[in-house]
Image (cartoon, rainbow, N blue to C red):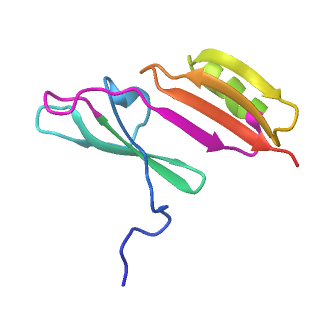
Amino acid sequence: MIYKPDHYNSLSPYLIVDEAQKLVERRFDHENGKIAHIELKLDDSVIMISDSTENYRANKSMLHVYVPDVFKTFDKAIEYGCKIIEKPVKRQEDPDIRGAFYDFAGNYWAVSTQKI
């Protein structure tokens, strides 16, 4: 029995933000032009995103994602206008190199590369 789309994990975060178009180009619109649903694929994960509405207000979220190169990903996010929370750093007894930033909507992103 197929219970989920191919290439989706069982859990997919869903962000409801103001001005969702700033995050992704592919989109499905409501009749009024607001974004009803867009998807952002990050490696093996899909994040679902929509514009906020009267019934679904914008929410801030915290997301953690493992990436092949935390420094490259972090620098690209800052280049696109994200605000630095913490530059990537390796803490003692933590196998991850981790950095963090806020996107334009105020979502907190932690990005990590594990180095064991």
Q: Is residue 59 magenta?
A: yes
Q: Quadrant location of the N terminus?
A: bottom left
**Residue 29 placed where, x, y %?**
21, 40
20 left or right of 72 in image: left
Which residue sits furthest front? 93
The rendered magenta stretch, by its main secondary structure, is classed as loop
* Magenta-tinted stretch: 51-70
Of residues 8 and 39, the one nearer the viewer is 8
Identify the residue shown where x is 46% and y is 69%. 6
**Residue 54 placed where, x, y %?**
13, 27
Identify the residue shown where x is 21% and y is 32%. 34
66 left or right of 91 in image: left
Q: How many numbered discs?
A: 0
63 left or right of 48 in image: right
**Residue 39 placed where, x, y %?**
40, 46
Identify the residue shown where x is 47% and y is 26%. 107
Identify the residue shown where x is 50% and y is 32%. 62
Of residues 24 and 59, the one nearer the viewer is 59
**Residue 69 placed where, x, y %?**
77, 39
Is 31 rendered above or below residue 91?
A: below
Image quadrant in which you'd find residue 90 = top right
Q: Is residue 26 magenta?
A: no
Image quadrant in which you'd find residue 15 = top left
